[in-house]
Amino acid sequence: MDNSKQLEEKRINVIITGTTGMVGSGVLIECLGSQSVEKVLVVGRRSCGVKHEKLTETIHQDFLDFSTIEHQFRGYDACFYCLGVTSLRATEAEYTLVTFDYTIKFAEACLRQSPGMTFCYVSGAGVDSVNQKGLMWVRVKGKTERHLLDMQFKRAYCFRPAFIQPLKGVKPSWEFYKFTDFLYPILKKLPKYVCTTEEVGLAMINAVIKGASVSALESKDIVALAR
């Protein structure tokens, strides 16, 4: 079998959320640039501002109810769920609404329409889906991970990056990132803690096509899977 036919057989259709944020916009760039991705559906509360022949965008405000749009999720191979919110200045109830409730409602809609889907969720370093002690955001993300892994997806993966370096024009999510460009050559020597937006996107694509050996991927696992 020649390489062109192998690539054709591996082409996947993906749904992406959170594309106005740093991680989601980086994942979108990799999906639009990948020969392995045929079609991309972006779902968000505001436009990502990107136009591409592969891309379809649906603006939807109520992330607790997808009944009017979930039919669009049919026939997709994967969801790359990158929607998130900072825990700073948020109450536990506010953080839980976005981090847990929105995520699980979206996952349920995906599962109803595409039960053979692979679901990739952006969590965070230090999260433990078993131990429910510690900081509020760690507990809420751990609870979210546990629910996703218990759902009947073909495969589900929790991405737990620590420091993420934005590449390819991706807008940083925090002001301090403007100071990291000169530090990154040093930081990348610490693969246990560092990956890039490019590596997150490539690792998600490979998780769908090849699978991963673990369900929770730390930074070093993300870097390895991206290769």
Image (cartoon, grey):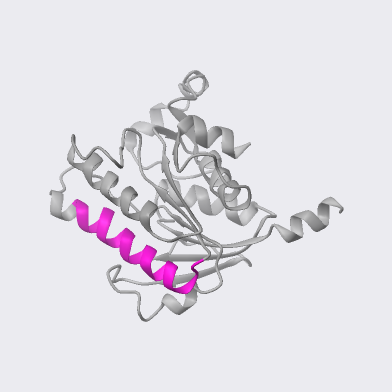
Determine whether 156 is above or below 152 in the image.
above
Residue nearest the observer in this picture, 25 or 9: 9
Q: Is residue 112 magenta?
A: yes
Judge from the rendering whether residue 149 lies leftward or rightward of residue 33; answer left or right: left
Residue 64 sits in which quadrant?
A: bottom left
Residue 190 is situated, as x and y percent measured from the top left of the image, at 47, 20
| Magenta-colored span | 95-115
Q: Main secondary structure of the magenta part?
A: helix
Any part of residue 221 in sight: yes
Residue nearest the observer in this picture, 36 or 129: 129
Determine whether 27 is above or below 163 in the image.
below
Residue drawn 53% across and 54% down? Answer: 28
Residue nearest the observer in this picture, 136 or 132: 132
Quadrant, the N terminus: bottom right
Q: Is residue 62 magenta?
A: no
Quadrant, the C terminus: top right
Q: Residue furthest right?
A: 2
Residue 191 is situated, as x and y percent measured from the top left of the image, at 49, 25
Residue 43 is situated, as x and y percent measured from the top left of the image, at 43, 66
Number of marks: 0
Determine whether 26 is above or below 48 in the image.
above
Q: Residue furthest bottom?
A: 68
Judge from the rendering whether residue 174 lies leftward or rightward of residue 25; answer left or right: left
Any part of residue 45 in sight: no
Residue 5 sits in which quadrant?
A: bottom right
Residue nearest the observer in this picture, 180 or 154: 154
Residue 53 is situated, as x and y percent measured from the top left of the image, at 63, 67
Residue drawn 27% across and 53% down? Answer: 99
